[in-house]
Image: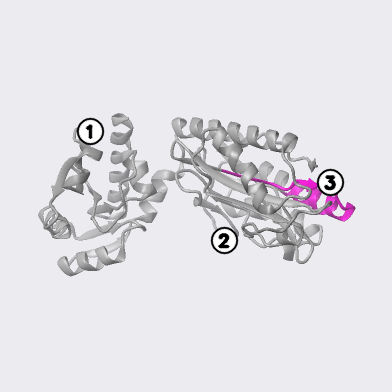
Amino acid sequence: MNDLVLDRVSSLQDGLTQHGVDLAIIAPSAEMYHLIGRKLPLTERFNAVLLPRSGRPRIIVPRLQVPLVQDLARIFDVEAWGETDSPLARVAAYGEDIGARTIAVNGHFWSSFLLRLQNLRPQARFVDASPITAAARLHKDEREIALLTDAARRFDAIWADFFANGRLVGVTERDVVRQIGERVAAQGFDPMAWCDVGSGPNGASPLHHHSDRVIQPGDPVVIDFAATLDGYYMDTCRTPVAGEPDPSFVVIYDVVNAALEAASHAIRPGVEAQAIDRAARQVIEAAGHGPQFLHRLGHGLGIEAHEEPYIIDGNALKLAPGMVFSNEPGIYIEGRWGVRIENIMLVTNEGGRSFNDATRALTVMR
């Protein structure tokens, strides 16, 4: 683990140099977890990683949190502050000592801390660290790909068991959440980050959470859930039907499935992210449902459920091996139903590879 941390420190310091940043301050967040492999408490007790452009980095924590980071002392100077100390004054002094004129803070750095630090260092320029930290997490390494592969395999098992043994007809959306949640726990995941269940007309709202609506025979049910395993998210969506589907629903289901397939085939290194969105959207538009595809095609996935790269029109980022993102086209017919199918994709040298093998065929459940 220490070798991995060293590699990531070096990579981030290269990013600071490229962006002309003298010091990065990284508060508890996905960025911190990616860098040091743990999540420190995000509270009024200030803690952060202080990463200079060159030289040995530092972790500043309240004294009671020292045991959480002491094993990193081979790589970081660990500075502890007492309950009556001013940790931000220490950060300001450290920045002054290393001559930091441009200081980057990550997106989870509390504004109350930032405003006080700006008052302590009025001559410094403060910038957003996100372009640097996002780039460091954009390409998953072999370890991360293995973690995601394992999580996807377990999600496939959840879907297979739910399709075979779960129930939709006559139960509430809330009960479906329970059924999925029990299977998620049995597969060793942390508690679900979310489980959205939209049956019948509720499925026409892409972010409908769930309700006490009783699922009726013939209702399509949009089920989208996510959970973490070893600190990394997995997220998929399927739209089974409670009993025999309406023939007109089968038509739009097949369109969405074809859109997902078109996007999958468009994925390859060097292609812009927006081109993948367009590949799916063109299929849906050709079927006359363009206005009913209400959202971007996808989002990156890893330590955060939503991170770079975002698969959306206007994003000219060129795909490269190791990038991971969702492929989730949808059609939403107000007052009737919705359909969304989601796989998580990996960019490889050969093209796109799905982490998920759960069936995308229209599934009829009891």
Query: Which mark is in front, 3 or 2?
Result: 3
Q: Say which amino acid is labelled 3.
A: Gly
What crowding class fits label 1: few (fewer than 14 Cα within 10 Å), some (14-19), or many (20 or more)? few
**Nearer to me, 279 or 222:** 222
Front-lying residue, 60 or 98: 60
Work out whether mark 2 precedes mark 1 in sequence or the reverse, and give the earlier one: 1
Quarter of the figure that contains the C terminus? top right
Depth order, front residue of 274/140 = 140
C-beta proximity under 8 Å, tags 3 and 2: no
For residue 314, which numbered disc appears in the image? 2
Is residue 314 one of those drawn in magenta? no
Residue 253, horizontal then vertical, whole percent: 79, 50
Front label number (2 vs 1): 1
Could you say which disc has been placed on residue 243 in the image?
A: 3
Q: Which residues are magenta?
A: 235-259
Q: Residue at x 46, y 30 (%)?
A: 142
